[in-house]
Every structure is written in structure tokens, then in C-alpha cells.
Image: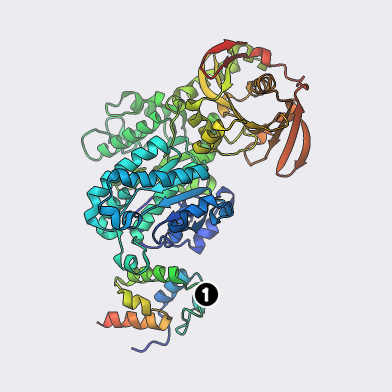
Amino acid sequence: MQQKIGPLFDLKKHSSVNFISEEMQKNRVTELFHSLKIFSIQNYTLDLIKEFLAYWGYNFKMDLDLAIGNAEVIHQYFLNENSDLYKFKPDVLLISLEHDTLFGEQSSILSKEDKLKLVSDLLTLITENFDKNIIMTTFFSTKFSDLSMLRDLNQTLVQLLEKNFKQIKFVDIEKCFFYVGFSESIDSRFWSTSRSPFSTKLLSILSFEILKIAKTLKGDIKKCLVLDCDNTLWGGVIGEEGIDGIALSSETYPGLYFYNFQKKILKLKEQGILLALNSKNNEEDVFDVLNNHKYCLLSKSDFVAFQINWDNKAENLNRIAEDLNIGLDSIVFVDDSSYECELVCTNLPQVLVYQIPKKTWKIDEIFEIDEPFLKLEFSEEDRNRTSLYLAEQRRNEFRAKHKHLVDYLNDLNLQIEFGLATAKDLPRVSQLTLKTNQFNLTTKRMALAEVEKFHESPAGRIFIGRTSDRFGEQGTTLLAIGKIDSFNCFEFEIFLMSCRVFERKLEFAFLEHCIDYLVKFDNCESFKASYMPTRKNRIASNFFENAGFSISNENASEKLYKRRSNESSNNIAMPNLITVLHSDIGGNIAKT
Amino acid sequence: MQKHELDPQIRSLFGRVFKMPEDEILLTSDRNSIKTWDSLTQINLIVALEDAFDIEFSPEEIANMNSIKAIVDFLEDSSNA
């Protein structure tokens, strides 16, 4: 049987070691799995976590490879370029420190400031020598009596991370202790015999928390929540019970649970998650509730797509993905019916499916621990996402009124605000590399820390394009990242465009402006680029050919291109349709 | 009751923990003959046994659990106690 409910942590079920069973292996949809390599450095024994990470990794569709290091030799990992850490090439470095072991005998004399100074020095060493993702747990101790001291210390630690070490994401280990209960979290037998402090319960939730962050860092990001209506947004069936008969209320059971769920959904929308409906109903019945029910928090304008019909729900989901131009793997689907959930799981294994619990009072638990939409960086674009998609729908109607693409583009009043990325653009830059799958020539992912490092390097250039048209602004949708080598050659390592602005020839105009800039201000004489095919980026497969580059080498995994600065692409008729504004680092805009 | 055969429940538990076919686990198997039985597996084994039989072993007992027979005897003793 396919896994029906997307990873849902349940302490009762997952308190002991859960092995990946043969049945799970058999149902594994190989092409949906990503590999994840974690290197863990800690000052206690954490080997036991292996089985838990593997199990939860499976549930998050990741094949896990874990290497366990030792904090006693932490300096060697970073200062020796042949160290086990560098040889292992982890995607994620995990750091976890037990308080008493770290500060030793002195721990009672040291002030909070002294302790943090020590940690800060250590983290400086790490971040200066390692630019991939880092996840750190907050401090813990095996003694209950340390709790208030630890809480105070951890609060300051988190502030330190947020201020000076933004690239380090933290796992709140106290939250894990809180969830399990302190007395159930520590196994003092294994602590005394093998310095292995955690009970299986704690290891299970800790693994879950670590992977939740790791999958986000690997680019597994959900963008859209698709909802059923009856017994999901309200209790009962609207077609039978009518608007006055359904259960939805801010005060009374069971309507309260649906009201709370709607509140949660609305909060996700505010964070930039797109909402859509997929329901077997009459459209007018559903819209009647959305528009007129006293306690219905969600209104019609909160949704960007509707599939309210009697069709197969898997087909409906395909249509929604197509309408919104997003991948099925960025969709979360919620329904109360086992039949529908199973149908979607079987036909569209990419979609993450949640089933509304039969026990109404358990609805509050949905998305609580598992947080499928967990997001670590926020950008301005996130907050406006729904209105961006609604503008897209108006644009499509406008497109339908024009016979020829050229006329349409002409009337759109396209604009690109072109420039080098500044510090405040970097979260969006990282986000674009993580989320863009289609028009992405190399699909190289960059964590914020990597982007920041790149931004500081003298030879690195990060170009961005903010686009707008008569229907509004789309925000930063174009990105090119590359380095200038000592032969004045610029190599495009990343070139991508958000799916929001497809089919407007913007990519050509943007590329030409990158090249113009590099020739004018950096004396670049030649350009290199590459295309690496994935399952999703076929749309970009001939981009560089069409942009005047010639192929210098080609094999199954890569096409390499070059172009001289004095060659130009003759076949681009479009840029005169596009107004390009140059914004310099100071934010002044000059028209060219 | 003298056991010459492994109880199916415990046999399947061993199979899962040691990641090997159940029928290859014999009453005479020990830490030398089961390749996957390292110190990490030992803790997984203890936890799985404690979970399945609702018992708690002391560190001394854990240190002596080095063969299938020793474990089976332990479980019998604790259920008779």
C-alpha cells in the first residue's frame, strides 16, 4: 500500500526504532527520491540516530547517508582539506553539543557571555571553512535541574545565530524534550555506559525535526495547498445539508475544528502558499459558503484555482498544476475520503497527501508537527504571491484577445529592471535557485550562505531582473550567476527564469543586458554557459543556441557553450518590445 | 520449559534488527556469527526487546547479552520472575 498520509509524526507509533520494511522498499518510487548526505559532529554518542534518520528520510523521500564525526577533533575537519568531512561531501553539516561535556568542570563558573564567546569562535571557524548548509541543535543537558539555565543560554544562542550566523539553521532541541517529556527523553543507562543520552522517543522526533529543515534546504518546497470542501473546510456535505446545516463555527464543537483549520490555511496563504479547491460539488453551493457563511474565514478571492466538478480528483490536480505552472511535487492535497486520498497517492505519487482524521478533534494536529510548508527564508514575493497569480489570470484573458504573440507582447508594456543583486536581494536569489525547476539551465541549488559568499567574491557577479507589465509587478524573476576568470571570460553557472514570466522573450533581453554589462564594465571578451538536462527543464534546452551561443561540447549530461563578445544574436527580434531600466547598487535607476 | 526452537515473534524481531533473513538466525548464533551485530545494533536490539516485552534491562544484563541463547534465557527468566 502506498503511504497515504504524508509524514505525520505520531509519538505512539514512532517511539521505538522503525525500520524501513521490505514492503516500503518495494513501494519506493525511485525517481522521486533525492539523496541527502549528512555529516554530524557532536560531543556525545549519536550513532543510534542512524536508523531514525533513515526511516524518516524514507518518509520525506530522501535516501540518507549519514557520517558521524567527533567534536573532539572538530578543528581537523575544517583545517585539513583531506579531512573525512571534505571527503564525504555532505549536503548538510549537523552540529549538536551537550552542555556539560562542552564546558566541562568550568561550566558552573563560566558566565553566559563566556560560553557564547566559546561557541561563537567555534562557529566562526566552521562557517569560514564550510559553505554548505549547517543545522545546529540548541544545547541540552541530561539533568532536569539545568533546565532554566539552559533555556536562558539557548535564547541567547538563537539570537547569536540569527544575528551573526544566518546560514546556520537551528533545531530547537528543548521543543523535542518538551514534546516527549523530559523523563522519557534521556536514557541514563546508555548515557552512563556509552555516552549515548537519548531515548528512542527523543531520537525519533529529533530526526524528524532535522529532516524537516534538511528537505527544505535541498529544495523540496511546497507551494500550493489543494483542498477538498465537504468534511475538510467544513463538517458535513453542503449539497445535502445546505449552508445552514454544515458544521462551521467559532465556538461550538465540531464546527470549531473546521474553523481553526481554516484559520491555519489563511495563515499559510499569508505566507505565500497558493490555495486551490478540488471538490466533488456544485460550484454555486461551494461559492455560497465561501461568500455568505458567517464563520467561513476563507473567501473566493483567497483561491487561485478551482476544480469543482465530478471528475477524477487526480485529473483535477493535474489541471491545477498546469494552470498554475507548478510541479505536482510542490502540491499538498488534503481530503477526508480514503478513496480520494488513495486514488491520488496511487496515480500521482509526487503529490503529498494528507487525510483529514475521522476523529474531528484531531484536525487541530494537522500540519502542527510536520509543517509541510516550513520555510526558512521569506522574501517580499512570498507575501504577494496570490495577487501575482490572480494578475496572471487577467493576463491570460488579455492574451486570448490577441491573435499574434508580437502584438500581445507589444501591448503588455513589459519592463525589466536590470541590475546587480544587492545584499537585500540575496534571500530571493537563493530562493530562486532552490525553487526554479523548469527554465533553469543548470539547476544548481544555492543556500543563502553560498549566495552570500559568492556575492562577496571579487570575480562573482549576480545579475537580477525585476519584471513588470501592465497588470502589475512580478518581482525578481530573472537570475544569472557566474564568475569572471583570468582570461576575461565570464561563465554563466546559473541562468534561470521564474515560470511566472514564461513566453515573453524576457530571457533573451535579460541575457543581452548581462553580456552588455560584462563587456562594458568588466572587459569580458568571451562567455561560457552550459545546459544540464533534468526531467523538468526541457523548456530551456535550446536557449543558448537561440541566444547566439555555439556548442563547444556535448554529452548526455551536459551541453557546453561559448560565445565571443563581438558576436551577437541576430535572431532576437524582441528586445525592442521590452523597456529595460538599469538599477545600480545604490538603487538609482537610469533608463537606457 | 526448555526451548530448542525460537519463538516466531522473537525470530522476526531479530531478523529486523540484524537485517537478515529470519531463518538464518539460530539459537546457537552469537555476536561472532552474526556480522551485523555491532555495538549500535546491540542498543537497537535492547530497545526493540524492551519495547516488545515491556521489560527493562540493567547495564550488566545488557553487557552479557552476546548470544541468541543468552537473550532467550534472559527473557524466560524475566517472564518467570
Number of labels in the image equals: 1
The quarter in which the N terminus of chain B is drawn is bottom left
- x and y percentages locating residue A179 in the rendered image: 29, 51
Which residue, given by chain and number where applicable, does mark 1 sit on? B35
Could you tell me which chain the residue with mark 1 belongs to?
A: B
Color scheme of the displayed model? rainbow
Whether A116 is drawn above or below A199: the answer is: above
Viewed as shown, does residue A97 lie left or right of B31? Answer: left
Q: Quadrant of residue B6?
A: bottom left
- Kind of residue indicated by mark 1: Lys
* The one of A235 and A251 positioned closer to us in this rendering: A251
The quarter in which the C terminus of chain B is drawn is bottom left
Viewed as shown, does residue A411 lie left or right of A529? Answer: left
Whether A359 is drawn above or below A313: the answer is: below
- x and y percentages locating residue A297 in the rendered image: 31, 28
* The one of A116 and A366 positioned closer to us in this rendering: A116
Viewed as shown, does residue A396 lie left or right of A44? Answer: right
- x and y percentages locating residue A476 in the rendered image: 53, 24
Q: Residue at x 64, y 41 (%)?
A: A534
Q: Residue at x 35, y 75 (%)?
A: B62
Q: Residues within 10 Å of mark 1 (few under 14, many from 20)?
A: few
- x and y percentages locating residue A317 in the rendered image: 51, 37
Q: Can residue B74 be seen in the rendering of this structure? A: yes
Q: Quadrant of residue A105?
A: bottom left
Q: Residue at x 44, y 24 (%)?
A: A384
Whether A186 is drawn above or below A219: the answer is: below
* The one of A54 and A359 positioned closer to us in this rendering: A54
Looking at the rendered structure, the secondary structure element under dot 1 is loop
Viewed as shown, does residue A51 lie left or right of A147? Answer: right
Q: Residue furthest bottom?
A: B2
Q: Can residue A340 be seen in the rendering of this structure? A: no
* The one of A42 and A61 positioned closer to us in this rendering: A42
